[in-house]
Image (tube, helix red, strand yellow):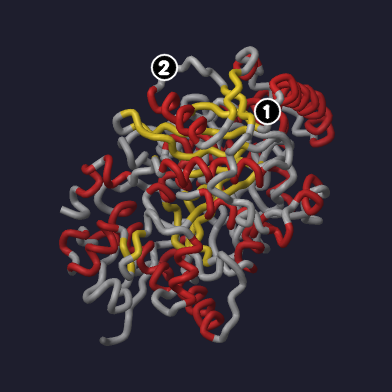
Amino acid sequence: MGPVVRPMRILRSLDSANRSRATGFLVGCATALILVSGCLQSPAASPSAADAPPGQRQVVCAGEVRGVDLQKATMWDLQQLMDQGRLTSVELVEAYMARIEAFDNNGPRLNSIQVVNPNALEDAKRLDAERKAGHVRGPLHGIPILLKDNVGTTDMATTAGSIALEANVPPRDATITARLREAGAVILGKAQLSEFANWVSLTMPSGYSTLGGQVINAYHGGDPSGSSSGSGVATSMAFSAGSIGTETSGSILSPSNANSVVGLKPTMGLNSRAGIIPLAENFDVPGPMVRNVYDAAAMLGAIAGTDPRDPATAESDAHLPPDHDYTATLTTDALRGVRLGVNNPTSTSATYQQALKDLAALGAILVPLQSNQLTQVSILEIPLIFNEFHYGINDYLAHEAGPGLPVKDLTDIILFNQQHPDKLKYGQDLLILSDANAGNGIQAEAAAIPVVASSRLAADKLFADNDVEAIIGSGAPFTSLGAAAGYPTVTLPAGYNGKNPQGLSFFGPAWSEAKLLSYAYAYEQATHRRVPPTTINLSLLEGSCG
């Protein structure tokens, strides 16, 4: 076989000169066992997967590499295969890139990926060499991961979906990026998001940004939900082994539920926010979005911990499990004898009622909540975001952003956007209202204190009054209370209403991630409710896998 050509996606986040140099083929020929022969063309002339050789179609359409189903394999499975020499990180990267090309850039054009990392294959080669030399860093070694495009990277632009930040290449990685790299993960690229974490206009749909356009839900072609929309869609389609999302109020949980993936919204202060473009510093948290609970635990162990760059994480190390290993407590009998509060126990959802039966069969003691107090907690943090965003984005531009940007503060961003009405399809009322606020960090922190305190009291009272370890609900009903209190939730697939995914969520007290993950794992292993989008929405295969 001749030399392998490995062209990359055009880096839309670079300036025009660098973009021109970076233009090229997106996905090249893979190794003989993956992409048997031939190369995908440049994006403008790329053939569909149906035109590709049989080996390539298998990777793209069936989602298989070396006989491994990328939709079902856990990171542990992938590690075992790489340790045995039956799979390489390079092969994984090429397989995910082939799927991105077929489904994201072509075929249904889901538009979940902002950019593929131009260094991904070289990073994978280096990590394969480390493994061959006997050095394996941990459960993420050689595993391709996508980042939401508000998470800082020095080798790709970090844009938050904004045309004003298209050329923003920060001088240092976000802390969680650095920790993922240190753990051996391959940063495969950046996922699209609702611009500025869905804080541009009240009329802007989820998944839209001036830089990237509209992200599409793979299950039904509609709303991808939340600001971590690209992370949700990309994860649902197995465009990587997992992804990072961020949440201020629902932006991990909602797209995880809508795209039938596992999402973990962690306790405020468990994971560092340093180097992430903020929405509201007092409520922002990053977390994993994956296809199974094991992978959520593995990723959390890599990114959690105290960070001097983020004072909110001061207590984090004291709450981590031994060796930062959240996978150690994942057992199939974790629900036995556990008291779980049941939100909305009389729901008419057949999927939810089946989940309740499954949980009871697994030994959980289901306790209907004394009153549906969750619906009585207003979205207390939302009014505070105007001031917090104004302060946070100005502070980011002053201290974290890369050089040479055309904007230096929120006012500049608004003026810059006004010069591009073709991109600003839904206006920018939220940006304008935020700019009208003082943008005072001290005021923002002072205003958040009573909201956080009252929300924690309300949540703690729910747990205590009902004597429960966690509260379960259909979809993501704990978004508001969990966001305001800074408490964790794990959501995972529970079934489908036609083409619409339905999730099951476990909401718990502060620092209860290990317990919540174990409960979710026991339910997942007993039910295996998740079904890939390509099985439910056959139209995805048209033009890609016909």
Q: Residues within 10 Å of mark 2 (few under 14, many from 20)?
A: few
Task: Determine which residue is flagged by label 1.
Answer: 468
Comparing marks 1 and 2, which lies closer to the viewer? 1
Work out whether 76 lies above or below 72. below
Q: Is residue 282 visible?
A: yes
- The front one of 544 and 355 is 355
Residue at the image position 59 percent from the left and 51 percent from the top: 330
Q: In the figure, is residue 211 to the left or right of 98?
A: right
Identify the secondary structure beneath mark 2.
Answer: loop
Question: On residue 371, which mark appears?
Answer: none
Q: Quadrant of residue 326?
A: bottom right
Quarter of the picture holding the N terminus:
bottom left
Image position, residue 44 (x, y; %): 26, 59
Give the amino acid at mark 2.
Thr
Image position, residue 342 (x, y; %): 57, 23
Count of numbered badges drawn on the protein? 2
- The front one of 88 and 440 is 88
Q: Earlier in the sequence, mark 1 or mark 2?
A: 2
Residue at the image position 45 percent from the left and 72 percent from the top: 89
Identify the secondary structure beneath mark 1.
Answer: loop
Residue at the image position 53 percent from the left and 30 percent from the top: 476
Q: Residues within 10 Å of mark 1 (few under 14, many from 20)?
A: some
Q: In the figure, is residue 516 to the left or right of 113?
A: right
How much space separates mark 1 and mark 2, taking CA atoms?
A: 23 Å
Q: Quadrant of residue 25?
A: bottom left
Task: Determine which residue is flagged by label 2.
Answer: 348
Give the amino acid at mark 1.
Val
Q: Is residue 159 visible?
A: no
Work out whether 141 lies above or below 220. below
